[in-house]
Amino acid sequence: MRGPRETGAPFFGRWLRRSLRRNLAAGAVATASLALSSALVFCLVAVSGGVEGQLGKELAAYGANLLVLPESAPLRFGLGALELGPVEEERHLAEADALRLPSAGIGVETVTVSSPFLLRIVKTRYPGLKVRISVFGGVDRVRKARMWEEMGADGIVLDSLLVNREFLALARIREAVKCDLELLVNNNCLSSCALSPAHMNALAHAGQSWHGNRGFFIDWCFLRCTEMKLRDPVNYVRSEWIRPEDLPLYEAMGYDLFKVTERDLPTPVMVNRVRAYAARRYDGNLLDLVQPYALPGGNGNERYYRKGIGWALRFLFRPGLVNPGRMLLLKRLADLRYMTRPVTGAPPVVVDNRALDGFMERFREKGCRDVECETCRWCHDFAAKAVRVDPEARRRALEAEPSPAGSTSRGLAASSATPTVPSRR
């Protein structure tokens, strides 16, 4: 028989005491778990703060991200991405941070954009800042150039794929606008290439951390382009480059700004290229000046390819996006095309620059825009004289090409992957 109900103590207190008496072990476990969780959270917060501080010290040891130059040599800051994402969402416009640079007093005079939206933002907020239109702007005719100039552009890099061999269009564009016009002289994409729009779009997304591929880029267009050249060597000539010897032809039309790429290549390679164009002559392999891979060994180029284990894990081990086994096959393909190592010995492909003397004469009177290559065959004739391909290197590189049907990529649709090779900036 139960006694009278206890009074005076709150119900919760009675319940807690009975629970502890009956489940002392469970209570001890719960208390220990709570203490362990609290300690773990504390440790994570402490470690996070410590890592942030240590990382700041490590990065500070490398120096500033921006190089401060004298006013006589102003810093040129480029933002030539093709697609920025939905412009209505500010988080996709990290490039707009560049607008703070003029007020920082570091001598920035020019920014490069390819978006009309960004052009208007810059000109509205900082009318004294010059804006140059990237080659990704696709300017290849008079009306496009006039539209950019009317919107406020101070300079335009013309679309080299579409205009470098079109002398009539070049002359008319130069006559139509007063802003600066710049020509990209040593890119080696295919002239009027059908891959170009997709390639530029993919390059624009390659560095976007918020994109679904999380910074992992499968450059199928680049590998496809190199395959096309190996299969048909005329494509080494049917390109967009301007030889150093041919600069006077463009200068005669009023062009005096020439852009030399690539920005990430070793300094000796860039110095060699600049010297060649400054001298208006180069005796040797034209690919030394226009190709962003298969660099000759020596002059420190080996260090350019020495990426380390972190690079290998980043580009070759991404199981959430691509089958690691397939990536090993693609690594071999890149090796055989000298995209991941320097060339030792004779280069697998040589384009004799001296054998191309006279090549541009045809284009002074007639372009290629509406001409069937197989009917013209001007480039074919010069390729037969100037291009030499090592047959064994060609065979091994082509046999390593994987079948697109066997691709297992779950990211950008492609059958091959390499680190991004910058082009046409």
Image (cartoon, grey):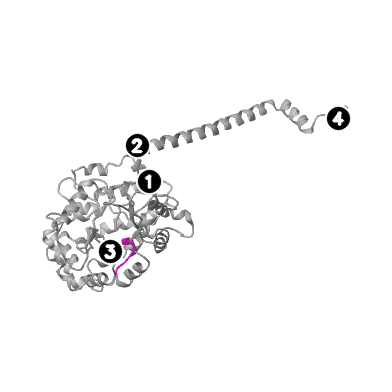
The kind of residue on which mark 4 rests is Arg
Please give the residue where the numbered disc 1 appears in the rendered image.
Answer: 324
Q: Are marks 3 and 4 in contact (CB under 8 Å)?
A: no
Q: Nearer the viewer, residue 7 or 270?
A: 270
| Real-space Cα separation, disc 1 to disc 4, in angstroms | 70 Å
Above or below 269: residue 404: below
Q: Nearer the viewer, residue 425 or 209?
A: 425
The picture places residue 273, in percent across and down from the top left corner, at 19, 53
Q: Which mark is residue 61?
A: 2
Q: Can the viewer see residue 221? A: yes
| Real-space Cα separation, disc 1 to disc 2, in angstroms | 35 Å
The kind of residue on which mark 2 rests is Ala
- Of mark 3 and mark 4, the one earlier in the sequence is 4
- Of mark 1 and mark 4, the one earlier in the sequence is 4
Q: Which mark is residue 5?
A: 4
Q: Are marks 1 and 4 in contact (CB under 8 Å)?
A: no
| Quarter of the view holding residue 385 | bottom left
Locate residue 70 relative to residue 17 in the image: left or right. Answer: left
Please give the residue where the numbered disc 3 appears in the rendered image.
Answer: 180
Where does the N terminus fall, quadrant-wise? top right
Q: Are marks 1 and 2 in contact (CB under 8 Å)?
A: no
* SS for dot 3: strand
Where does the C terminus fall, quadrant-wise? bottom left
Q: Nearer the viewer, mark 2 or mark 4?
A: 2
Span highlighted in magenta in the image: 134-140
Please report the residue visible at 17 percent of the width from the left and 56 percent of the height from the top.
277
Q: Are marks 3 and 1 in contact (CB under 8 Å)?
A: no
The picture places residue 25, in percent across and down from the top left corner, at 67, 26
Q: Can the viewer see residue 389? A: no
- Of mark 2 and mark 3, the one earlier in the sequence is 2
Does the magenta run of residues contain 170? no
